[in-house]
Image (cartoon, rainbow, N blue to C red):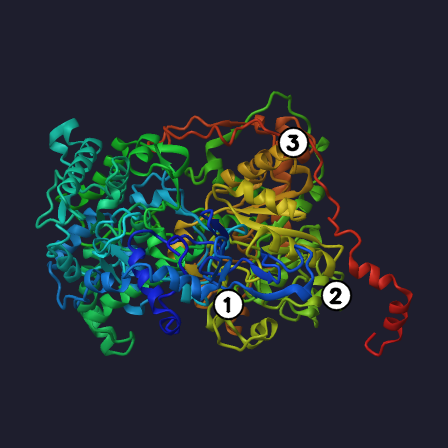
Amino acid sequence: MILVPEAYKNHPTLTIKYPEALDFYDYYKGQMEAWDGPALLLFSDGNTVGACLDRNGLRPARYWKTVDNFVYVASEVGVVPMDESKVIMKGRLGPGMMIAVDLLGGQVYENTEVKKKVALSNPYGKWVSENLRSLKPVKFLSSTVMDNEAILKNQQAFGYSSEDVQMVIESMASQGKEPTFCMGDDIPLAVLSQRAHLLYDYFKQRFAQVTNPAIDPLREGLVMSLEVNIGKRRNILEVGPENASQIILSSPVLNEGELESLLADPQLKTQVLPTFFDIRKGVEGSLEKTLIRLCDAADEAVRNGSQLLVLSDRSDEPEATRPAIPILLAVGAVHQHLIQNGLRMSTSIIADTAQCFSTHHFACLIGYGASAICPYLALETCRQWRLSTKTVNLMRNGKMPTVTIEQAQKNFNKAVTSGLLKILSKMGISLLSSYCGAQIFEVYGLSKEVVDLSFRGSVSSIGGLTFDELARESLSFWVKAFSEDTAKRLENFGFIQFRPGGEYHGNNPEMSKLLHKAVRQKSESAYSIYQQHLANRPINVLRDLFEFKSDRAPIPVGKVEPATSIVKRFCTGGMSLGAISRETHEAIAIAMNRIGGKSNSGEGGEDPIRWNPLTDVVDGYSSTLPHLKGLQNGDTATSAIKQVASGRFGVTPTFLVNADQLEIKIAQGAKPGEGGQLPGQKVSAYIARLRNSKPGVPLISPPPHHDIYSIEDLAQLIFDLHQVNPRAKVSVKLVAEAGIGTVASGVAKANADIIQISGHDGGTGASPISSIKHAGGPWELGLTETHQTLISNGLRERVILRVDGGFKSGFDVMMAAAMGADEYGFGSVAMIATGCVMARICHTNNCPVGVASQREELRARFPGVPADLVNYFLYVAEEVRGVLAELGYQKLDDIIGNTDILKQRDISLVKTQHLDLSYVLSKLSSTEIRNQDVHTNGLVLDDKILADPVVRIFILTSVYH
């Protein structure tokens, strides 16, 4: 009951069943964070034995009691042979329920009896009512504290950009929800960027896949809570009223007034610790030395009785020579120091910071130890926006919903809290108190010394920036606020949208124009220019840090396997009909079928009219598909890969049997841990019909498949798909993260034919910006781990490995092959080849060329023909052939998993000098030929029944036949 409490907060009926237990839960909530499942736990102290389910109840648990006083608990009926006539009691454990057996007294206690007995052992209700307090809400400020010049100065000093203010903070203040964007994160990883980044950008949120499912925050909100307790946590084994002496916060997001209330609380003995380092003091004022002194100050404060530490970068007047320590670095360092000195349970940490404005920032701070955050500059920015002349005029003219200054700040908080629930749910975590200090992030680009001091225990596989380099990065923001030629407005870094002079984007206008010219003119020279453009780009992804080498002599290209063979390994991404237009979806499918590759239906079904070859084409047009041009008789618009996603939109038996492959989408590279999202304005009558929905209704798929809560559940779905379509291979789509190798091993054992690894830079039609920018990992690391883990477990030859995410050229294909991939997925670039101009407004339904719009007048502008995409893939295949010939290999199969042909490039970038990529160059390899045959279920009960002559006669004579 202490470790795995039920979801009691949102269950008013429990106050009738056992109110004593609610007091018990409230008492211990502040002493021990709840553990999440899915799990069935069995426990015993020698005198009592019992079983309980976690709060979500996603594991089966059944129990029986027999006349001879035996009690059985098992996941399924029939695990233990039993005479049903002897069963006198049986039941099933639900979410948070338990059963216990008193071995000494011979008594069986069901759920309510157990909890009442435990809860009445002490006067928990009295202790809670007398000692546990709730923080009273305090109104938001109704005017700005700083003038506009001071606000701008602080925003510049703390690394804000105009995109952050306009696209994130102001959007949240006006709408009360996270801003939605589209496409993927096609800028360099922070450690590869030549621009300074906030420290948060070096962290990626982790997420659950298969073995530990995500939670659905919309449909399972009953089990979730953002409440957090502030104050000392005492010895859980010593029960007493003082243990309940804490303050409950209903949300981890505080306004200025609420922070003041906590500072004034006499019981907490709050200590405010400034977080600045002084560059005038040389080594003694360095970032690392200052952090150590900060940790010592925190240590002393806690030993002197402080139950609340407030780490603050607030100052009346920022000084040019005293930049702020990145607040995440400070929180993590103090958190780790107190843990190592046995003091962490004696205090809580709050961050009072200007450097926190997106949900990812809040999640990082909480994940590394902060119980709450006061984002004072973000709130000040909300107030400034609401009071600005521009905003007032827009509201007055009805072009923007009217909100008060208080409502703007409430909206911001609401957006943050709903975003936090979504981030928690990605990892299958129900309570914020369980997430606090859990460090569920991967680090990409920080050195061991930084991780050891502030983020000990976090996964960090490639090394990166030292303290001195982090100090320089922080200082580069800080000095902008004090420069004589400081701009009068915030700079646009171009981290979200492409802009000339901003951060490099892989999918940029120049790249799009070069590709359009190459495929439309069918020009090899134009493709060579496109290829050269990619070769000369700034370092953008991890594979750009490698180049090819070989100990073999080059061979003539004519000896290399033909392009027509290589293109059969190419697939397009799972772009749904709805996210993109009918014209785009069908053109891509026709092109892939022409070359023997595979297109993917995405989530949303498919029109049956596309399942038969065209026979009515005249001059490139068909009455069957009159909206397309450039057609040929024999073309087929069916998607070879049919996707089965969590929403199951458009999934029917006929849909499944008309597939060459069936893909189970567990996660998507651009937004792992979340389901698909189709805005209501894109749900036309046609789309609604295919998805069995209604026009104009937003279609949001749940984060988990609600029938997959374990690897066994996945195995069952794979079995079912093999049964419904025995000739189709079944693939499972995962997203790169640490630990994916273990998950992939389970997927291989579950009888999947193909495992797809997606990188964080994959595209999407619509997703929250924080998910696009801050979740998922590079496929280079995920593929390497998966390939090596499968080899280590003797499973590599059982599956085909497919990889996708940011593929643009034959160089990418060759890199992926050397790292272990058999097949290669192209998403965004396939759309570009068919006409996409990268307007990055897919989510608005206003795509100017009709590639990603359902508006008929825009779809009429669609410029693409299937031949454009055919040309592109043939050029990519020819590029692969050229590289293979240079390296002295005849077939792509010869280099799959062969990292001997890779070496790290000699690149002198400031941020990359401490990167360690040796993991990618591991020498583990497998020479086994991958199984190309469809895995079968073997002889099953259905086959035996259908083989019965009586059954066959009945079927053949049935009126339904």
Residue 935: where, in percent of width, then height? 73, 48
Residue found at the very far front of the displayed protein: 105
Viewer-nearest residue: 805 or 716: 716
User: Nearer the N terminus, badge 3 or badge 1?
Assistant: 1
**Residue ID for mark 3:** 926
Q: Is residue 769 above or below residue 440?
A: below
Callout 2 amino acid: Asn
The location of residue 616, given as percent across then percent down, is 75, 69
Among all residues in the image, which is located at the extreme left? 316
Q: Secondary structure at mark 3?
A: loop
Please state which of the two labelled residues, at mark 3 or mark 1, is closer to the viewer.
Answer: 3
For label 1, the crowd category at 10 Å Cα-Cα, with few meaning under 14, some 14 to 19 and many 20 or more, is many
Is 708 on the left or on the right of 930, as rendered? left
Q: Residues within 10 Å of mark 2 (few under 14, many from 20)?
A: few
Q: CA distance from mark 3 to mark 1?
A: 44 Å
Nearer to us of marks 2 and 3 is: 3
Q: Which residue is mark 1?
A: 853
* Secondary structure beneath label 1: loop
Q: Is residue 617 visible?
A: yes
Instruction: Report which quarter residue 396 is drawn in.
Output: bottom left
Residue in the picture at 12% in, 50% down:
269
- The tag earlier along the polypeptide, 1 or 2, is 2
Amino acid type of disc 1? Ser
Label 2, on which residue?
612
What's the CA distance linking mark 1 and mark 2? 25 Å
Disc sitting over residue 409 in the figure? none
Which quarter shows the N terminus?
bottom left
